[in-house]
């Protein structure tokens, strides 16, 4: 193998280890919060999208539910003390800009948790109705401590259920690995969604080989390139 290939392989293995550690921390914090506050369906939070429109026709959002989820979890997570982090670029799996500017700054709002290991946990929209198949009771994005945030590479998506936090892209999930972790984006997914289906693959198969041989991989196919 060439030196660049070895460096890339090592970096991918590091990301697998980092993601598994963050997921363990996040899952334990959720279980401890549930032990203290009871089943999340009984938590006093509200759905982010209120269903109302302002005078300009824009959706009226209530982010207090996201803040509450983060506050209930953060007391069980060792934090770094940081208050913000800027990414040079924020990209989808195939390299498109996730945001209009291409970059982004994550500030210490109430729905962000800066872990002691450098990762950032962000509670996204939450739903009082947990029956939704793709996001359940809400979604979580985890950013690894890198200069570029790339969904499926250094940024990964999870969703909240009454039973625990689950990774996007597992078998039978609405956000499938085959459609949402395709580096070629053959299904034409928007930049804000493409790459979300990679999380379960990384955690369960402990590799990021979908970056190298996407045509070979799948839950009913090969689990790695070699």
Image (tube, rainbow, N blue to C red):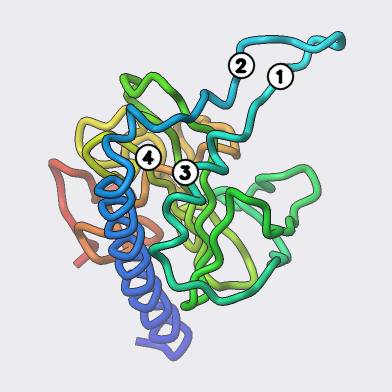
Nearer-N-terminus badge (1/2): 2
Image depth: mark 4 or mark 1 in front:
1
**Residue 75 occupies quadrant:** bottom left
Mark 3 touches mark 4? (CB < 8 Å): no
Q: Secondary structure at mark 4?
A: strand
- Measure the C-alpha gap from mark 1 to mark 3: 20 Å
Instruction: State yes or no: discs 1 and 2 in contact (Cβ < 8 Å).
Output: yes
**What residue does disc 3 label?**
69
Badge 2 or badge 4: first in the primary sequence: 2
Find residue 57 and report its horizontal and vertical position in percent. Answer: 80, 10
User: In the image, is residue 208 above or below residue 109?
Assistant: below
Residue shown at 40%/59% (left/top)? 211
Q: Work out which residue is located at the far left of the displayed protein and give it.
A: 220
- Return the residue at label 4: 159
| Residue that mark 1 sits on | 60
Q: Earlier in the sequence, mark 1 or mark 3?
A: 1
């Amino acid at each position: 193998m060439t030196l660049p290939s070895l460096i890339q392989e090592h970096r991918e293995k590091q990301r697998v280890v980092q993601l598994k550690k963050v997921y363990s921390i996040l899952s334990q914090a959720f279980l401890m919060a549930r032990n203290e506050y009871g089943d999340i369906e009984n938590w006093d939070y509200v759905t982010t999208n209120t269903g109302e429109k302002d005078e300009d026709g824009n959706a009226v959002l209530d982010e207090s539910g996201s803040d509450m989820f983060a506050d209930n979890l953060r007391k069980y997570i060792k934090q770094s003390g940081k208050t913000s982090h800027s990414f040079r670029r924020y990209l989808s799996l195939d390299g498109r800009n996730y945001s209009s500017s291409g970059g982004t700054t994550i500030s210490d709002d109430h729905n962000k948790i800066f872990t002691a290991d450098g990762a950032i946990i962000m509670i996204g929209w939450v739903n009082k109705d947990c029956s939704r198949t793709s996001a359940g009771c809400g979604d979580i994005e985890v950013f690894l401590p890198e200069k570029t945030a790339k969904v499926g590479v250094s940024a990964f998506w999870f969703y909240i259920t009454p039973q625990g936090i689950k990774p996007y892209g597992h078998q039978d999930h609405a956000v499938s690995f085959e459609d949402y972790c395709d580096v070629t984006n053959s299904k034409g997914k928007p930049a804000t969604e493409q790459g979300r289906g990679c999380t379960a693959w990384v955690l369960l198969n402990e590799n990021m080989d979908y970056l190298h041989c996407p045509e070979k991989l799948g839950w009913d196919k090969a689990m790695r390139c070699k």
